[in-house]
Amino acid sequence: MRSGLRRCVTGSLVAVVVLAGAGCADSAELGQRFESLMEGVDGIVEIETGGIDYPLGSATAEATVVVESDLGDDDLAAVAERIRPFVAREVGDEWQYVDVRRGAVTFEVLADEADTAAQLDLAHRVADDPVFAEASLGTHEFGATTSDSESPRRGFGITVVPSASSDVLTAWQRARALRDAEPQLAEVDVSAWSQDSRRFITENVSGFPSALDDPATSDVVLDAADQADLLAAVGDDDLGAGRVLVLPEGIRVDLKQPTVTGQQPPDEVAEASGRAERIASALAATSGVSGTTIGTVSSPDESREVDGDLSDAESVVDAVDSDAVTYSAISARSVEVRTVRPDQVVPALRAIGGSADVSRLDVVRVSPDRSDPRGLAFSSDPATLDVLVSVADAVTASPRIEGVSVASTEARVDVVLGDAVTEGSLDDVVAAVQAAPRGTVVAFRRDVREPVDLAVETVGDEAVADCSALETDDQRLCEVVRAAWAE
């Protein structure tokens, strides 16, 4: 659970020292310094050194230390005590690591004597516990650095793997109990992997950066009891060869399997879809956090956001011809469908509009597959689907229109223009939206961080947009809209 740690030594890394070199020191010299430090220390089986040398004369070095698997606690503490002053003296204020591994347990030596003693004590406790097959205690770093002057949040953690006679949830709960018994370890968060790496559960609020858009600001909605219940709700048969991650921010279940071509056979896609539906239903029934997104379940070509009963959304997506759908994403109040080709967007919208359950949703999104170069996208609330259909029919039929998103609501139709829109294609866009019913308000805007309306017109009325107050680029687009509207 570390980030930013450079590893250059091949093989299993069981003890790591990272030294920041300055001036003309190279990684070999830094490694030799560490080897000299460890000379004469009993119980060491092996030391491996390596590192990286940078063009401007700085370097980082690593040392791997393996101690005897049956080394006594006192001798293990002596190894840690030899390293600890080195960490305080040589590493300085930087986040650097010194790990010592005895058998299946790895722990970190920290600069503070009390912290190192606490790590040693917990390492001893997990080593003697039959619930664990492996355990690793160390530091981790999480949360993005927003500027050079701001550092990520950092903390300590223990990660355990259950023994053959245990399971990941039991190991996690046991490690938490051992942590809770030591007041000095109150801030240590606990994680657990299953032996087959299919199941993971953690107290670490950062979770996995790859699974979370913004760990530093994510809403934390699950306590340990919620997490345990959700993990238990995902059955082994439905999980199959997939993976489940249970984070305080929510649960992530991924049933997608890598293939050489990136595509999976239709029968496997359908089979995984059924498992994903059962898992999502079980999670929704288990969760006591009503109306809140507690996680996602992904399978090939599908994603389910678990925020309540998904049956209405499932029914709506099922109304669309499955041969036309490359991907769908649903939640309790929304559906998204991607079609193989642009000409399948309107039939998909019509099928969705004809579904008996669509009125229970808040928003419907349909677009061609992301591989389609035109980059079109359409969305609507259920009440204005007919308006969106009329506009989408005209937009998809015009081959010059690219990079345009159309959103229909009760108030108006918003047309967002991407960078691919030219003055010529904008003429076609204007003509397309005029296919909406008379009296429909249409707003044109650019696809920018702070969108500003370029022009707001009403179908059936004369152009009224005032372009004079806009910036130069926006002013030109506004003038094109105004002129085309009047034609």
Image: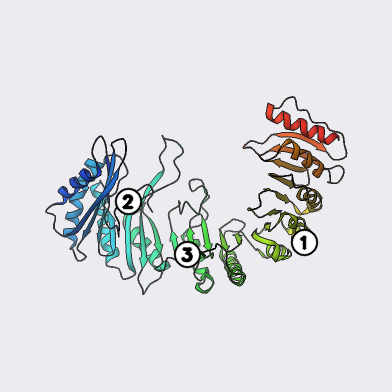
For the N terminus, the image quarter is: bottom left
Identify residue type, mark 2.
Arg
Q: Quadrant of the C terminus?
A: top right
Identify the element where label 3 is drawn.
helix
- Disc 1 to disc 2, C-alpha distance: 54 Å
Give amino acid for label 1.
Ala
Along the line of sight, which residue is nearer the eye, 42 or 486? 486
Q: Which residue is mark 2?
A: 7
Identify whether 318 is placed above or below 427. Answer: below
Which label lies toward us, 1 or 2? 2
Mark 2 Cα-neighbour bin, 10 Å: few <14, some 14–19, many ≥20? some
Q: Type of residue at label 3?
A: Ala
Secondary structure state at the residue bearing disc 1: helix
Nearer-the-camera pick, 126 or 368? 368
In the image, is 227 to the left or to the right of 151?
right
Q: Residues within 10 Å of mark 3 (few under 14, many from 20)?
A: some
Q: Position of residue 289 (x, y in %)?
A: 57, 58
Is the image coloured rainbow, by chain, by secondary structure, or in one colour? rainbow
Q: Residue at x 78, y 43 (%)?
A: 412
Q: Position of residue 352 (x, y in %)?
A: 75, 60
Q: Is residue 471 visible?
A: no
Query: SS class of the residue under badge 2?
Result: loop
Left or right of residue 287, residue 401 in this image: right
Instruction: First in sequence, mark 2 or 3: give its number.
Output: 2
The circle drawn on residue 228 is 3
Q: Can you identify the residue that label 1 sits on?
A: 351
Label 2 with label 3: CB-CB less than 8 Å: no
Q: Residues within 10 Å of mark 1 (few under 14, many from 20)?
A: some
Q: Position of residue 214 (x, y in %)?
A: 51, 47
Q: Position of residue 31 (x, y in %)?
A: 21, 47
